[in-house]
Amino acid sequence: MGFVIPVKNAPNKFIIGLGRSLRVLEWDGVTDGTASNLKTLHVIADNNLNGRFNDAKCDSIGRLWAGI
C-alpha cells in the first residue's frame, strides 16, 4: 500500500493507493486486517506496468493528488 487518506465526513472510509490501483476502503479500525467494500476508482494504464501509487496528499479544497 502506497498511501492511506481518510475521507472527510465519511467515517471508516479511506482512499488507498494499492499497487497500480486507486481504491476506496471501508474499515472500522478495529477488525484485524478485515476490510469491506473495496471499490476500485482507477487503475494505471497497462502501458505503465512498472508504475504504482506511492504517495498522495489532499489540497486545501479536498482534491487528492497522487503520484506514481
Image (spheres, rainbow, N blue to C red):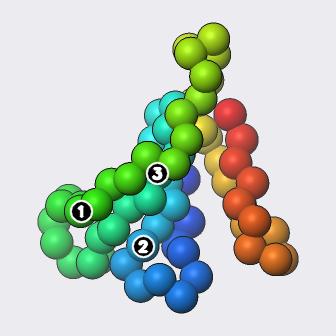
User: Residue sitting at 46 percent across and 67 percent down?
Assistant: 14
Q: Which circle marks residue 23 in the picture? A: 3
Q: Distance between the Cα atoms at labels 1 and 2? A: 10 Å
Q: Distance between the Cα atoms at labels 2 and 3? A: 10 Å
- Front residue of 30 and 45: 45
Q: Quadrant of the N terminus?
A: top left
Q: Residues within 10 Å of mark 1 (few under 14, many from 20)?
A: few
Q: Which circle marks residue 13 in the picture? A: 2
Q: Which circle marks residue 24 in the picture? A: none
Q: Quick check: 33 above or below 10?
A: above
User: Residue sitting at 63 percent across and 16 percent down?
Assistant: 48
Q: Earlier in the sequence, mark 1 or mark 2?
A: 2
User: Residue sitting at 75 percent across and 54 percent down?
Assistant: 65
Residue marked by disc 1: 36
Q: Distance between the Cα atoms at labels 3 and 1? A: 12 Å
* Disc 3 element: strand
Which amino acid, by three-letter code, is at mark 3? Arg
Q: Quadrant of the C terminus?
A: top right
Q: Quadrant of residue 36?
A: bottom left
User: Residue sitting at 51 percent across and 48 percent down?
Assistant: 41
Residue 3 relative to residue 29: left or right: right
Which amino acid, by three-letter code, is at mark 2? Lys
* Disc 2 element: strand
* Disc 1 element: strand
Q: Position of residue 19 (x, y in %)?
A: 47, 34
